[in-house]
Amino acid sequence: MGQPDRNLTTRQREADNNYNHYNHYNPYNHHNHYNHYNNYNLSTSYYQLQTSYFQMTLQEIHKIAQQGEGLKIEFKKKAAYPEKIVREIIALANTEGGFLLIGVDDDGTVSGQRFIEEEVFVMQKAIGQHIQPKLEYQVEVIKLTPKKGVAVFTIPKSPERPHFLMEEDKRKAFVRVKDRSIQASKEMWEVLKRGKNPKDMVFTYGEKENILMKSLEENGKITLKEFQFLAKLPRFLASKTLVRLVLANVIQIIPQEKEDFFTTK
């Protein structure tokens, strides 16, 4: 029989030490929070968990980082202010899904972060406490050196959208616009919720729809307030009309920081 691989033995021992250190202060170790997609449980052995750690290669991390921040990619050097970072996760889940990379600089440099497992723990705690409904996601850790690593949170376009940030008795939804995460309007909430299960929309063109389409033809875009004023409608009815036409694929909603606008498809 051949001699055992001493390097492998050393790596396994270091991995076990890292795992035991992380598991020591992780209150989620009986709730499958570490990897929702693959159902890894921190109470199982490290070697089962290791499969999750190395599904994504360092080369793939660099490839994502080179794309820069955008609709589906967000970088954070570390998990400072995790209650604010969850807004990025919510926005990704509510829009097209994507990646949150911790240990990557704003310019895309994959510099890594010391004690990356602690960063993961902090983020998982914030996700569990502040996001409703429960969000399914995957997290992987890629080691750059024995002490530094990168955490990759993979967030799918959620079938449970819209997800909300819970702050005391208030809830806020966020969506992704280019490389920014912005608070979603009530109209965007409705589009997210009702757009999960597309159905053929049946409606008739009345006076208010004609006013809307004429304005769009002349100006290219319109806000809720502008439509409400032009059609002389109460706000709730103007909102309902716009949402219905978005769901019918007649117009589209363009989320904005201050006030959304609507355009033709």
Image: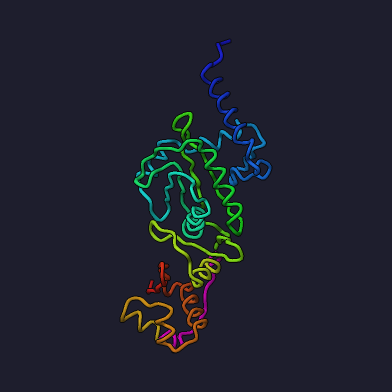
Task: Identify the colour scheme used.
Answer: rainbow
Position of residue 85 measured from the top left corner of the image (x, y, whole percent): 49, 52
Which residue is at a point 42% across and 51% down the rendered structure image?
73
Residue at left 38%, top 58%? 178
Residue appearing at x 48%, y 66% in the figure: 184
Q: Give the range drawn in magenta.
A: 196-210
Asked whether residue 37 is drawn in magenta, I would say: no
From the image, give the main secondary structure of the stretch colored magenta: loop
Q: Quadrant of the C terminus?
A: bottom left
Query: Looking at the image, which is closer to me, 43 or 106?
Result: 106
Image position, residue 251 (x, y; %): 41, 74
Q: In this view, does 237 lie to the left or right of 45?
A: left
> If the image is split into quadrants, where does the N terminus sit?
top right
Task: Please indicate whether residue 58 sits to the left or right of residue 34 in the image.
Answer: left
Residue furthest toward the left?
Answer: 218
Where is residue 263, by image quadrant? bottom left
